[in-house]
């Protein structure tokens, strides 16, 4: 860095981008909550978080750490099981989709948390957030009952490093999409 230049910090997180077809189907479950002033997650932003957000001054170093972990894991299938309110049904704050916590997914999330120096403060519960409830979540859940088992799956061939939007802005920016080991280069990120 030059004398007056300071490292600019970015709010980053690691996750799995949900493929457009499935993301659109999941977003449709949340559409009724628009009337309830719920903050819906745009289909293009639907993802599964593996490492929660942190402040980072070197995006390149974060990409390198992500690449080191990704080459140790093979592609796997991510299953979507249920759409409903959470994290506690009695005090819902989110509409989300529960995902199966297969061995590959849990091992990947655990390894990534260690690589990025984060500690798991509660058990890993893989889910995809579809909407955040602004008002009384119980009232919203009663007015718009959404509790449905689903059976969808996607192949996970990459993991992404995302940048959170600036305050007041929307949309996540993919800083890097890194192929899991054994993924042919022509298919990495094609979903």
Image: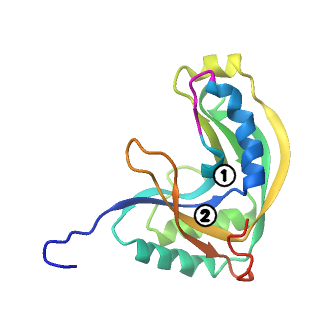
Residue marked by disc 1: 126
Q: Quadrant of the N terminus?
A: bottom left
Can residue 125 be seen here? The reply is no
> In what element is the residue under mark 2?
helix
Residue at image coords 74%, 73%: 75
Which span of residues is magenta-colored? 35-40
For marks 1 and 2 on the same chain, the one whose residue lies earlier in the sequence? 2
Give how far across and how far down residue 167 sits, in percent: 37, 44
Using the rendered view, name the quadrant where residue 62 is placed.
Answer: bottom left
Residue at image coords 55%, 19%: 136
Q: Quadrant of the C terminus?
A: bottom right
Please name the colour scheme applied to the rendered image: rainbow
- Give the number of the disc on residue 109: 2
Q: Main secondary structure of the magenta part?
A: loop
Give how far across and how far down residue 36 sits, in percent: 61, 21
Can residue 176 be seen here? The reply is yes
Note whether 84 is above or below 121 in the view shown.
Answer: above
| Residue 44 on the magenta span | no
Residue at image coords 48%, 79%: 64
Q: What separation in Å lies between label 1 and label 2 (alpha carbons)?
A: 9 Å
Using the rendered view, name the quadrant where residue 39 is placed.
Answer: top right
CB within 8 Å, label 1 to label 2: yes
State left or right for residue 160 relative to residue 180: left
Q: Residues within 10 Å of mark 1 (few under 14, many from 20)?
A: many
Give how far across and how far down residue 6 sits, in percent: 21, 69
């Amino acid at each position: 860095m030059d004398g007056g230049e300071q490292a600019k910090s970015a709010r980053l997180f690691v996750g799995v981008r949900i493929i457009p077809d499935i993301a659109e189907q999941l977003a449709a479950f949340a559409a009724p909550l628009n009337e309830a002033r719920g903050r819906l997650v745009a289909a293009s932003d639907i993802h599964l978080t593996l490492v929660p957000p942190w402040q980072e001054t070197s995006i390149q170093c974060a990409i390198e750490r992500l690449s080191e972990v990704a080459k140790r894991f093979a592609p796997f299938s991510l299953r979507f099981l249920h759409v409903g309110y959470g994290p506690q049904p009695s005090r819902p704050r989110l509409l989300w989709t529960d995902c199966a916590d297969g061995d590959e997914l849990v091992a990947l999330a655990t390894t990534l948390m260690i690589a990025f120096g984060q500690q798991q403060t509660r058990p890993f519960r893989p889910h995809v957030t579809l909407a955040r409830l602004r008002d009384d979540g119980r009232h919203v859940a009663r007015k718009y009952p959404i509790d449905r088992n689903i059976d969808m799956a996607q192949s996970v061939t990459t993991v992404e490093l995302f940048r959170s939007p600036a305050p007041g802005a929307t949309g996540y920016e993919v800083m890097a999409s890194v192929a899991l080991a054994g993924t042919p280069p022509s298919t990495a990120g094609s979903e």
